[in-house]
Amino acid sequence: MNRRKFIGLGVMAMTALPATLSAISSIDFRATKPDVWKAKTVEDAIKALYGDIKPEESGVTVKVPKVASNGGAVPVTIKSDLSAKTVALFQNMDPESAVAVFNVPEDGIINYFLKIKLKATDANGGNGVITAIVEGTDGKFHKGTAALQVAKGGCEG
């Protein structure tokens, strides 16, 4: 095979493969489950996404700072060793509870880090709670939570 033909086939394969993989494994939850994004409570958002489930409170670790000085960029880490289909993230501080839903590829590693925007904790000192739900490939659901406070003002805004 000559070099140009080989390079041309390689480029075509590289452009076609991601499109094929994303079409197979990707679900647009905003289009297929619009009520999730309108839910005002974590419980309502979970029910709109997964139905009436009772997740096990094991197998999922959520890490956040105890006090976030900047509500505009709160770091969140989600980890799990479970074999999963989806990972969903929720919070109870903003008007809409759903934050994100991730499709997990086959044999994917759940070690996600992201920054989310949250309102300041209420004046009564109540904690905010970040909740992650992992939908296992075995059909079981697992849950992890972490509490935090978001400072009003703070050094960073």
Image (cartoon, rainbow, N blue to C red):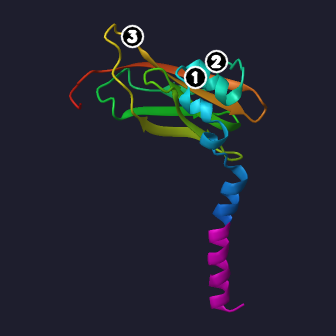
Label disc, if present, on residue 117 of the rendered structure: none
Is the residue under label 2 in contact with that under label 1 (CB below 8 Å)? yes
Query: Quadrant location of the N terminus?
Result: bottom right
State the SS at label 2. Answer: loop
Decide if residue 69 is on the left or right side of residue 79.
Answer: left
Circle 2: residue type:
Glu
Do we see residue 103 in this rendering?
no
Q: Residues within 10 Å of mark 2 (few under 14, many from 20)?
A: few
Q: Position of residue 105 (x, y in %)?
A: 67, 47
State the SS at label 1. Answer: strand
Label disc, if present, on residue 126 of the rendered structure: 3
Residue placed farthest to the top in the image?
A: 124
Could you tell which of marks 1 and 3 lies nearer the N-terminus?
3
Residue wearing tag 1: 144
Residue 8 magenta = yes
Q: Position of residue 130 (x, y in %)?
A: 49, 23
Circle 3: residue type:
Gly
The Cα–Cα distance between marks 3 and 2, rounded to whole angstroms, is: 22 Å
- Look at discs 3 and 2 and give the one toward the viewer: 3
Q: Which corner quadrant of the image does residue 79 belong to?
A: top right
Position of residue 2 relative to residue 96, above or below, is below
Q: Residues within 10 Å of mark 3 (few under 14, many from 20)?
A: few
Residue wearing tag 2: 57
Residue placed farthest to the left in the image?
A: 155
Q: Position of residue 41 (x, y in %)?
A: 54, 19
Q: Which corner quadrant of the image does residue 74 belong to?
A: top left
Q: Which residues are magenta?
A: 1-16
